[in-house]
Image: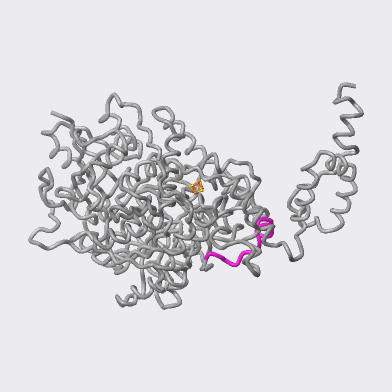
């Protein structure tokens, strides 16, 4: 017998006589938020991320201002703003290797959803967001979220996501508390996260 | 089917006594558990202001319970959807089978090293040691796990495995050990946490960049969509899940939940219970192979290693709901004083005290059996663990049930002193006349106990002197204290 049959056999034997149907209680929702976008901005800032709120026509300027002078910047194809001087991952059909990515100081991406209650930015790595690696290896991540992408809480975000895609949920910069519980930002992921939050027109 | 869980520890009382003598350990633990406890409580209070934490717990427990009660179907569904997503599914009865599968995948790619995300299950099966025996180095990439690995040490907490080490010890370990296995720590390394973290970043980055094979566990596995989920803080998880060409994930069969929407209560409960954050810095989800992004060869090893034993235990089955948040460790008065090592397994604290006996079964032979059988007693039954558990595992009830199982398992042989004492207590307490009779002999009984065999029991507990008269005698003489 294969391990598969062994295991499934033991599972069925262990559950002999146990009712399979089990009614799962519905998870509670949070009370409605008066200002979903403001709540999101506050919660993201709570993680020691930098939050920049701006009008739609200011995005390119604010993104440029968030990038240090002379920084080597990588962007995904289809990014919603122009970043002068940045290299595009996958340009000419050639994706950057991990070693090549390591030479970049910063990355600029769009996002898929913002979750207000938890201060979470969710990427589904569609156009404008790029492969998972590009928003991971450089030390500074500038992420653009539009006000109409922000939802109140986790149960509002899940139905918007396509499970067949890979997702990255980001709540503040990389952090560890492993040494005497002192919080240190940025162990392996980006040490700095800048949220550019684009207000409605 | 014991695998690598047993780490050669003596039974809990012996290990605990040693730990109690370590003032540094107790100081670190009290600080850590106290800090995390306070953070968690703030977050629970915050949820209660806008919603209902208890309802959220019910939903979280329900999602896990529903999947467990239907585990056979859910596992078959998971296998089918993973396969449809381009992943290769393997099944492993025990640690040895799982380790062999991981080793053979690494060998098929001709590598002599793999990078690893922190995962309890790979520790449970002793994967690092098994790979080492095959000439494959397994690099731990979580900062705390790196400290433990470089220190040739054992983790002592689920969440903060190196909590027993202070900053100067960590500096010494980095200086002495990093150069042996890769990029050395800089000579001017100080014991500032930020400086130590930067040294770990530089040391590990060269390993991430060149890695061909990554190994992970999973916090959740979604049957319907074939999605695996890893929750972490540092980004080392993202590195291991994204940069290598090949990814192997070892997943305990109890990690299955039914649908993508089931993530909702779990992702709201886990970080709040675990680190006292609204959300952990990084959560990664992936469903098999994503063309053009991340590993293009994805393997999933579905592991039993005693989980079906636990599933067959009617009272203990609920332990499989555990989402490894470690909240129960942080509130446990016993854990706070003894630390994780005393539990002799990768699952310490209250959950370890039930999970290890459930996975391995009680009444086993030799020192390992003795160690396992000692764990259900490593608790004061104060109930704090049940109160915090986000998925409502009634740990105290399982402990009591397991104590009964331990006693039963030793029936027939020479009964243990504790077993006899509890049996006597059960007889006496079950009948008021007998109780009254027995009380008259308490003083004599205690004297006898002190001389014959209670030494082991009393060396870790106070045995109070017997009162001069019994409660009943006092009540009768004084009319309940009125005269
Ligand atoms: S038993 Fe409950 S509290 Fe303890 S680690 Fe598991 S989920 Fe968390």
Q: Quadrant of residue B122?
A: bottom left
Image position, residue B430 (x, y; %): 77, 43
Left or right: residue B86 compared with residue B364: left
Give the residue at the far left of this rendering. A92
As displayed, is residue B46 above or below residue A182? above
As displayed, is residue B313 above or below residue A198? below
Q: Quadrant of residue B202?
A: bottom left
Residue toward you, A68 or A7:
A7
Residue at image location 64% in from the left, 60% down from the top: B373
Residue at image location 60% in from the left, 46% down from the top: B397
Image position, residue B468 (x, y; %): 90, 38
Query: Which of the colour schemes (rainbow, by chain, secondary structure, one colour) is used?
Result: one colour
Task: Indicate the quadrant containing the C terminus of chain B: top left, top right, bottom left or bottom right.
Answer: top right
Left or right: residue B101 compared with residue B469: left
As displayed, is residue B414 above or below residue B232? below
Q: Is residue B271 visible?
A: no
As displayed, is residue B398 above or below residue B479? below
Image: magenta residue range: B5-17
Residue at image location 42% in from the left, 73% down from the top: B131
Residue at image location 53% in from the left, 62% down from the top: B154
Image position, residue B63 (x, y; %): 40, 45
Q: Is residue B119 visible?
A: yes
Image position, residue B159 (x, y; %): 47, 51
Left or right: residue B68 compared with residue B402: left
């Amino acid at each position: 017998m294969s391990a598969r049959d062994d295991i499934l056999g033991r599972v069925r034997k262990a559950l002999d006589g146990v009712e399979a149907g089990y009614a799962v209680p519905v998870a509670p929702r949070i009370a409605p938020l008066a200002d979903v976008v403001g709540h999101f901005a506050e919660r993201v800032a709570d993680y020691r991320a930098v939050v920049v709120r701006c009008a739609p026509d200011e995005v390119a300027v604010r993104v440029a201002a968030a990038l240090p002078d002379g920084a080597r910047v990588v962007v995904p194809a289809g990014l919603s703003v122009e970043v002068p001087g940045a290299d595009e991952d996958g340009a000419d059909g050639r994706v950057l290797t991990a070693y090549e990515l390591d030479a970049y100081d910063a990355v600029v991406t769009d996002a898929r959803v913002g979750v207000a209650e938890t201060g979470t930015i969710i990427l589904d790595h569609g156009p404008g967001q790029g492969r998972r690696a590009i928003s991971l290896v450089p030390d500074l991540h500038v992420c653009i979220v539009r006000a109409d992408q922000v939802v109140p809480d986790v149960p509002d975000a899940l139905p918007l996501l396509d499970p067949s895609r890979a997702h990255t949920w980001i709540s503040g910069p990389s952090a560890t508390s492993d040494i005497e519980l002192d919080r240190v930002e940025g162990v392996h992921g980006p040490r700095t996260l800048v949220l550019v939050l684009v207000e409605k027109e | 089917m014991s695998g690598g869980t047993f780490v050669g520890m003596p039974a809990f009382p012996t290990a605990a006594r040693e730990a109690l003598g370590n003032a540094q350990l107790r100081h670190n633990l009290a600080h850590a558990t106290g800090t995390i406890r306070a953070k968690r409580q703030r977050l629970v209070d915050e949820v209660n202001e806008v919603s209902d934490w208890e309802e959220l717990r019910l939903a979280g427990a329900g999602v896990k319970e529903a999947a467990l009660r239907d585990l056979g179907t859910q596992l078959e569904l998971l296998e089918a959807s993973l396969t449809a997503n381009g992943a290769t599914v393997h099944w492993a009865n025990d640690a040895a089978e799982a380790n062999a599968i991981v080793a053979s995948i690494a060998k098929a790619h001709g590598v002599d090293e793999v990078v690893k995300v922190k995962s309890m299950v790979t520790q449970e099966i002793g994967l690092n040691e098994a790979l080492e025996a095959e000439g494959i180095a397994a690099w731990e990439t979580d900062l705390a796990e790196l400290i433990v690995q470089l220190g040739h040490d054992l983790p002592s907490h689920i969440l903060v495995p190196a909590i027993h080490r202070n900053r100067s010890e960590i500096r010494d370990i980095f200086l002495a050990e990093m150069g042996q296995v890769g990029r050395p720590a800089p000579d001017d390394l100080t014991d500032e946490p930020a400086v130590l973290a930067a040294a770990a970043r530089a040391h590990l980055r060269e390993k991430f960049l060149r890695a061909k094979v990554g190994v992970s566990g999973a916090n959740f596995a979604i049957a319907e969509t074939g999605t695996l989920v890893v929750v972490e803080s540092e980004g080392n998880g993202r590195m291991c899940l994204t940069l290598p060409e090949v990814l192997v994930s070892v997943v305990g069969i109890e990690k299955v939940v039914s649908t993508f929407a089931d993530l909702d209560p779990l992702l709201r409960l886990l970080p709040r219970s675990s680190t006292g954050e609204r959300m952990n810095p990084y959560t990664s989800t992936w469903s098999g192979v994503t063309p053009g992004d991340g590993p293009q060869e994805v393997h999933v090893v579905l592991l039993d290693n005693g989980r079906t034993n636990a599933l067959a235990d009617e009272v203990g089955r609920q332990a499989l709901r555990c989402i490894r948040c470690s909240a129960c460790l942080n509130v446990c008065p016993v854990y706070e004083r003894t630390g994780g090592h005393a539990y002799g397994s990768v699952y310490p604290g209250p959950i370890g005290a039930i999970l290890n006996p459930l996975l391995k079964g009680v009444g086993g032979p030799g020192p390992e059996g003795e160690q396992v059988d000692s764990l259900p007693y490593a608790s004061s039954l104060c109930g704090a663990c049940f109160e915090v558990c986000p998925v409502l595992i009634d740990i105290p009830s399982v402990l009591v049930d397991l104590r009964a199982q331990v006693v039963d398992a030793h029936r027939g042989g020479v009964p243990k002193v504790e077993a006899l004492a509890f049996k006597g207590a059960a007889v006496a307490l079950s009948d008021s006349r007998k109780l009254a009779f027995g009380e008259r002999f308490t003083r004599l009984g205690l004297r006898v106990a002190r001389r014959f065999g209670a030494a082991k029991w009393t060396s870790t507990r106070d045995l109070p002197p017997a009162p001069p008269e019994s409660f009943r005698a006092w009540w009768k003489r004084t009319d309940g204290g009125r005269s």
